[in-house]
Image (spheres, rainbow, N blue to C red):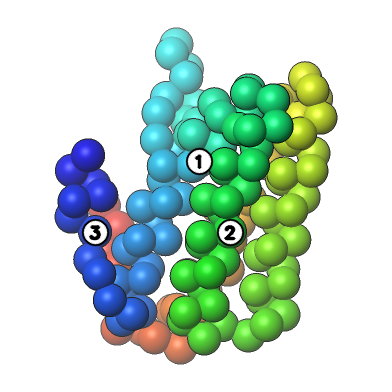
Amino acid sequence: MEIIDSLPLGNEPAAIRQRIEAMEMLLERSMTVPGTNYRIGLDSIAGLVPVVGDLITAAMGAYIVWEARNLGMPKWKLWSMGANVAFDTAIGAIPVVGDAFDFLFRSNSRNLKIIRKHLDRHHPAARTIEG
């Protein structure tokens, strides 16, 4: 995968931001539903596999929270992000209803928004040009 090969290493805010954005893209917006313009990701697809799929995507969502901790984000923001992942995992684990929920509730996109707001305020040099 060329995206993963091009991700930067290190603890600089810009490098962390790129890794988080890549993970969010993989989990929430990596493919388009055929015949529509609606984007989904691994979170929605893996959620169709009972229990295991939800646990795997929860771990991937927890990685985003862990990277946010590496940025030195306040604990209350980390708790809020963790709650987003936990809520997504809990509801997503419910058969049928959880699968539909996974298509609509994007905890990782919500968490990315929290991180971007923090970075734009505290590390403006980490801002990337989105295209």
Disc 3, SS? loop
Counting residues from the N terminus, which is met first, the one under dot 2 or under dot 3?
A: 3
- Across and down, in percent, residue 51 comes to 70, 32
- Across and down, in percent, residue 75 comes to 68, 82
Rendered residue at 64%/42% (across/down):
55
> Where's the N terminus, which quadrant?
top left
Rendered residue at 39%/57% (across/down):
21
Give the Cα separation between the discs numbered 2 and 1. Answer: 14 Å
Disc 1, SS? helix
Mark 2 Cα within 10 Å, few/some/many (few <14, many 20+)? some
Residue receiving disc 2: 62
Q: Amino acid at mark 1?
A: Glu
Disc 2 + disc 3, Cβ < 8 Å: no
Q: Amino acid at mark 2?
A: Ala
Mark 3 Cα within 10 Å, few/some/many (few <14, many 20+)? some
Quick check: 67 above or below 74? above
Say which of marks 3 and 1 sits in front: 3
Residue 28: assigned label: 1
Give the Cα separation between the discs numbered 2 and 3. Answer: 19 Å
Horizontal relation, residue 22 to residue 99: left or right: left
Horizontal relation, residue 18 to residue 82: left or right: left
Q: Is residue 104 visible?
A: no
Disc 3 + disc 1, Cβ < 8 Å: no
Residue receiving disc 3: 7
